[in-house]
Image (tube, rainbow, N blue to C red):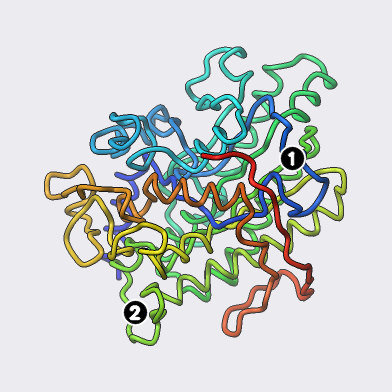
Amino acid sequence: MALLQRLLVALLRVLVAGEHAAGDAMPSPASGGGGAAVNVEARYARVFCFGNSLTDTGNNPLLPATAGGPSTSPPYGMTFFHRPTGRSSDGRLLIDFIVKALRAPQPTPYLAGKTAADLLAGANFAVGGATALEPAVLESRGIVSVVPVSLSNETRWFKDTLQLLASTTNARRRIAETSLFFFGEIGVNDYFLALASNHTVEQAAATLVPDIVGVIRSAVIDAIVAGARTVVVTGMIPLGCEPQLLALFPAASAADYDPDTGCDARFNELAEVHNRELIRMLRRLRRAFPAVAVHYADFYRPVTAIIASPAKYGFGDTPLAACCGGGNAYNFDFAAFCTLPASTVCADPSKYVSWDGIHYTEAVNKFVARSMLRGVLPMPNPIPSPSLSIPLSSSHEHTGQETSRELATL
């Protein structure tokens, strides 16, 4: 395990250029997902984004600690841009599709913005490899951090940006009120690093989930206090379906694998615990701030739906294998990671779920964005896990299915 830990940390140092994966379907910005109703005809003047490589559209190559990662080299970007853009995918990310559907300007990567004019149309603060918890907090728990950026850093960047854009409190509040705040998936790197540091799934659920959800709560409240009227918060991805984890942490028993998907149920249960607590937290925020539309974006279920029935959604018959990589049945190996000489790239990324074993293909990002925007899947009710528990809440709230209308055709 010590060797595996060193290898995983080494890989993350190489991969700091990204981690753009998608998320489960949410009651969309058009849905009745909670809080104030949203007019689907409304246009947001800008979008402010937070998260990791699943949302990062170009900060990672500009951060000195993470510059030069895989997302800056071919075949990244091959599908849509036909060149690397700093996105950790073959093409566009979830946020690209959401911004297009909302007819909002493309947010500028924060580190690429040099003047107020660069950021007035929106800013993306997400950084590939970013964690929810601060590096010092992770280190105090024996977890080795790789990228020196956490969600609190990103919220500080947002506050600095707001100060740059307007000189008065009222003007800054007006900017926030007319913006969409999109919190992409955040926390997956904390869990990856914990597992690499010999933490068990049970330890991660008990010690990390409460604090990660708490940090997300603080970031959302910061946005609301600044004047945000519409906030979207993305849930955790299905960890047990990630080629990286399937290749690095094989289960000891066949019973640990879901018979319908082949995913590792242990890691998926951790993701489900995270999502249940995130939903509970967001429901409390809705009650505390009834004038604000706070939406949960479900990343988990659209991805597992594809993996369970890939042909139904137009994908190929190897949904757990990476398009770009090599080395084993999951096409994920340190020595053959995407862009390395030993790696190969599939002929048609649109038939694959995973692009490089960690991040999603453009096809999946588009599918998840459509699910979110149309509200195809209702918000799940938090149901207690039979084997994992965390000391956050004992209340189990129930709401009916929440539906939404389609915002736009992608």
The answer to which image quadrant residue 76 occupies is top left
Q: Nearer the viewer, residue 300 or 196?
A: 300
Q: How far apart are the two marked residues, 1 and 2, measured between alpha carbons? A: 41 Å
Above or below residue 200? Residue 376 is above
Residue at image coords 21%, 50%: 346
Circle 2 residues within 10 Å: few <14, some 14–19, many ≥20: some
For disc 1, the marked residue is 230
| The furthest residue to the left | 342
Q: In the image, 176: left or right of 88?
A: right
Check disc 1: other Cα within 10 Å, few if <14, some if 14-19, many if 20+.
many
Please state which amino acid type lies under the numbered disc 1: Thr
Name the residue carrying label 2.
251
- Quarter of the image for the N terminus: give it: bottom left
- Marks 1 and 2, the one that precedes in the sequence: 1
Q: Where residue 97 appears, x then y in whole percent?
A: 51, 38
- Give SS at disc 1: strand
Q: Residue at x 82, y 16 (%)?
A: 168
Question: Dot 2: what SS?
Answer: loop
23 lies above or below 397:
above
Of tags 1 and 2, which is closer to the observer?
1
The structure residue drawn at horizontal position 66% and vertical position 25%, both measured from the top left corner, is 160
Mark on residue 330?
A: none
Q: Position of residue 101 (x, y in %)?
A: 58, 36
Residue 77 screen position, x and y as percent: 32, 35
Q: Residue visible at 78% across and 30% down?
A: 177
Asked if disc 1 and disc 2 are in contact, CB closer than 8 Å, the reply is no
Q: What type is the residue that disc 2 sits on? A: Ala
Q: Is residue 75 above or below residue 315?
A: above
User: In the rendering, at what x and y percent does residue 376 appear?
Assistant: 61, 57
